[in-house]
C-alpha cells in the first residue's frame, strides 16, 4: 500500500513538472494565471530530486523515472541553480577569437533622489567611479541618470556620461526617456570602446523607462556585433508590501489584491515586450549580446522566450543561484546576460562587492567562435 501510494505521488510530481514547463510557453497576455504554474517549477524539480533518492533506496527501476526526468529537464534545473564547478577560463590556443567583456547594471538613477542618497552622495560617487574604472569593453546601464552640466546642489557628481564615456575612452549612446527641469537625463545607456556604426531604440509602443536600445559595434577583428540593453516592465510592487502580505493574514488581506493586480499588469506587459524583442533580434544578421533588467525570474515566459533563442551566461557557466537583486527579497535573479550561438562564454560573475544600487552589476566575457 505504501509503495503504491509513493508511486502515485511520483507520477503526480512528474506530471506537475511537465505541466509547469508547458506553462512557461504561455504568454501572459493570452492567459496570465499560467505564470503561477511556471513559477512552481523549481518546487516540482526539487521534489523530483527527492523522489529519485527515495526510490534509489527502495526500487532502482522506479528511480529511473525521476532520474530520467531530471536528465531531460537539466537545462531547466540550471536556470534556478547552475552547476559548473569544473569550468575554467580558456587560455592559449583555446582562447583564440575576438573577445568582448560586457558589464551590465541597473544603477537606480545613481541614488539621486533624497530617499536614496547618502551623505555627500557617497554611494553615487563610488558607483560612477567604479563603472568608469572598469576594463569592460561595453557597459550597459538601466535606470541611467546624467546631468550634462554641473548643478548648484549636486555640482558635478552626476556627470556620468562624461566620466563613464569619453574620460574612460568609451563612446556613449544614451536613450533618453525624460528630462527634468534642470535638464538632467533619465533612460538607458550603452558605452562602447568599439566604434558604434548603427544604433536604435525599441519603444514597446510608448517610450518610457521600460524600453530597449541596441548598438551595432565594429570590432578590431572587422566583425560587427549587436548589443541590446533592455529594461522590461517592473511590477511596481514595494518589497515592504510583499513582505507584509505573507507575514500575516491581516497583511495578506490589506495588500494581497493590490499586489495581485500589479503582478498581472507586469506579467502582461513583459510578455508583449519580450515578444517584440525576440522578433527584433530574429531580424538581426549579427552575433548578439543581450543584457537586461528583466524584472522577471528564470521560471517565466519572459526568460523562456529569450532562452529559446539565446544562451544565458549564468546558466551556461555559472554556479549557484546567481542572485542579482540587492534587497529584502532573497534569491532573486532578475538581471541577465544572454548571447547568441556565435559566442563562446568564457567567464561570468555577479559583483556582490558593489552594493550601491538595489541590483548587483554583472560582468561576462564572450568570445566569437571561429
Image (tube, rainbow, N blue to C red):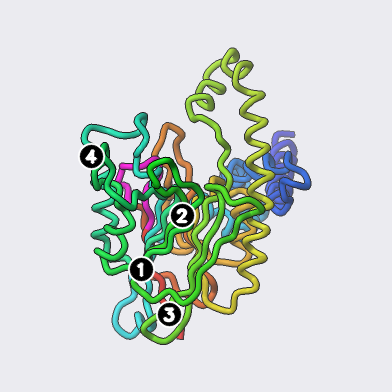
Eyeballing the image, is 337 above or below 7? below
Q: Main secondary structure of the magenta part?
A: loop
| Residue beneath disc 2 | 188
Q: Tell me whether circle 2 and circle 3 mark residues in contact (CB < 8 Å).
A: no
Tags 1 and 3 touching, CB below 8 Å: no
| Residue at image location 51% in from the left, 65% down from the top | 214
Sooner in the amino-acid sequence: mark 2 or mark 3:
2
Taking depth in this image into account, of 19 and 190 the one nearest to the observer is 190
Going from N to C along the chain, the mark reached first, 2 or 1, is: 1
Foreground of the two, 230 or 93:
230
Q: Which mark is residue 171?
A: 1
Q: Which residue is identified by label 4?
A: 122
Residue at left offset 35%, top offset 80%: 95
Decide which of tag 1 and tag 3 comes sooner along the chain. 1
In-front residue for pair 72/190: 190
Q: Secondary structure at mark 3?
A: strand
Q: State the separation of the CA atoms marked 2 and 1.
A: 14 Å
Eye-nearest disc, 1 or 3: 1
Residue 54 visible in the picture: no
SS for dot 4: helix
Alpha-carbon distance for marks 4 and 3? 36 Å
Residue 338 position in % (x across, y down)? 50, 63
Amino acid at each position: 500500500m505504501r509503495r503504491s501510494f509513493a508511486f502515485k505521488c511520483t507520477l503526480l510530481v512528474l506530471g506537475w513538472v511537465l505541466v509547469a514547463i508547458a506553462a512557461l510557453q504561455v504568454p501572459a497576455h493570452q492567459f496570465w494565471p499560467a505564470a503561477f504554474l511556471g513559477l512552481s517549477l523549481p518546487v516540482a524539480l526539487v521534489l523530483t530530486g527527492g523522489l529519485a533518492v527515495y526510490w534509489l533506496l527502495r526500487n532502482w527501476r522506479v528511480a529511473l523515472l525521476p532520474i530520467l526526468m531530471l536528465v531531460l529537464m537539466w537545462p531547466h534545473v540550471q536556470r534556478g541553480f547552475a552547476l559548473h564547478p569544473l569550468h575554467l577560463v580558456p587560455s592559449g590556443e583555446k582562447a583564440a577569437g575576438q573577445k568582448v567583456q560586457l558589464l551590465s547594471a541597473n544603477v537606480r538613477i545613481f541614488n539621486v533622489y533624497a530617499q536614496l542618497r547618502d551623505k555627500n552622495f557617497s554611494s553615487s560617487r563610488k558607483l560612477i567611479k567604479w563603472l568608469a574604472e572598469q576594463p569592460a569593453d561595453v557597459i550597459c546601464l538601466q535606470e541611467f541618470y546624467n546631468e550634462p552640466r554641473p548643478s548648484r546642489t549636486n555640482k558635478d557628481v552626476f556627470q556620468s556620461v562624461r566620466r563613464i564615456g569619453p574620460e574612460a575612452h568609451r563612446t556613449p549612446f544614451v536613450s533618453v526617456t525624460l528630462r527634468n527641469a534642470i535638464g538632467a537625463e533619465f533612460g538607458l545607456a550603452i558605452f562602447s570602446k568599439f566604434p558604434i556604426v548603427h544604433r536604435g531604440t525599441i519603444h514597446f509602443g510608448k517610450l518610457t523607462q521600460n524600453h530597449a536600445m541596441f548598438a551595432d559595434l565594429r570590432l578590431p577583428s572587422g566583425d560587427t556585433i549587436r548589443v541590446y540593453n533592455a529594461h522590461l516592465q517592473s511590477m511596481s510592487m514595494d518589497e515592504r508590501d510583499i513582505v507584509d502580505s505573507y507575514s500575516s493574514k491581516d497583511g495578506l488581506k490589506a495588500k494581497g489584491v493590490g499586489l495581485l493586480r500589479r503582478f498581472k499588469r507586469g506579467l502582461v506587459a513583459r510578455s508583449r515586450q519580450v515578444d517584440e524583442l525576440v522578433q527584433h533580434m530574429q531580424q538581426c544578421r549579427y552575433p548578439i549580446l543581450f543584457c537586461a533588467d528583466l524584472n522577471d525570474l528564470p521560471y517565466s515566459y519572459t526568460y523562456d522566450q529569450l532562452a529559446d533563442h539565446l544562451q544565458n551566461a549564468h546558466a551556461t557557466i555559472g554556479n549557484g543561484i546567481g542572485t542579482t537583486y540587492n534587497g529584502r527579497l532573497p534569491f532573486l535573479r532578475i538581471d541577465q546576460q544572454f548571447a547568441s550561438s556565435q559566442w563562446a562564454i568564457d567567464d561570468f560573475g555577479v559583483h556582490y562587492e558593489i552594493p550601491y544600487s538595489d541590483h548587483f552589476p554583472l560582468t561576462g566575457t564572450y568570445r566569437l567562435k571561429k
